[in-house]
Amino acid sequence: MQGEKLRDFIVDQLEEIKAQDIKILAIGEKSTIADYMVICSGTSSRHVKSIATLLIKELKEREQPPIGIEGEDAAEWVLVDTGDVIVHIMMPTTRDYYQLEKLWE
């Protein structure tokens, strides 16, 4: 899976896992690191970690394992890098502080 198909799969998984405030940013024209960035929030650090764990599990089952994962231990902000899509799963306070949407728009 690549590009839009991978993005759609990830968003479907995040919705199923009850991630909140899911935003999709097309960053392909601004950066070479990925085509899309998906940002979402969890209700607690446990929820953030659970979202990340379940997303990673689903990606592996679809033979699209992440190439990088950061922040799983603290679970304030977990980054899941699939190559074409970078997923940021954040606590609302962390998301408000870093304002990635404004940075990449």
Image (cartoon, rainbow, N blue to C red):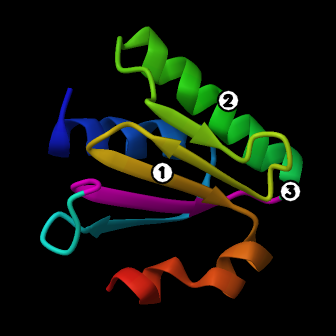
Residue 4 percent across, percent down from the top left: 17, 45
Q: Is residue 25 left or right of residue 2?
A: right
Q: Which mark is residue 53?
A: 2
Report the number of discs.
3
Residue 49 percent across, percent down from the top left: 77, 41
* 36 inside magenta stretch: yes
Q: Nearer the viewer, residue 5 or 100?
A: 100
Q: Quadrant of residue 61?
A: top left
Label 3: which secondary element:
loop
Q: Residue at x 74, y 49 (%)?
A: 48
Q: Which mark is residue 7?
A: none
Foreground mark, 3 or 1, reads: 1
Q: Earlier in the sequence, mark 3 or mark 2?
A: 3
Residue 98 percent across, percent down from the top left: 63, 82
Q: Is residue 64 above or below residue 35?
A: above
Residue 99 percent across, percent down from the top left: 57, 84
Please tell me how crowded label 1 is: few (under 14), some (14-19), or many (20+) other residues with Cα within 10 Å. Answer: many
Q: Earlier in the sequence, mark 3 or mark 1?
A: 3
Q: Is residue 90 left or right of residue 73?
A: left
Disc 3 designates what residue?
44
Q: Is residue 2 left or right of residue 6?
A: left
Q: Residue at x 72, y 47 (%)?
A: 71
Disc 1 designates what residue?
87
Q: Name which residue type carries label 2.
A: Thr
Q: Name which residue type carries label 1.
A: Val
Label 2: which secondary element:
helix
Tag 1–tag 2 contact (CB < 8 Å): no
Q: Name which residue type carries label 3.
A: Ser
Please tell me how crowded label 2 is: few (under 14), some (14-19), or many (20+) other residues with Cα within 10 Å. Answer: some
Q: Residue at x 31, y 69 (%)?
A: 25
Q: Earlier in the sequence, mark 1 or mark 2?
A: 2
Q: What is the spatial separation of the Cα atoms under label 3 and label 1, in whole angstroms?
A: 17 Å
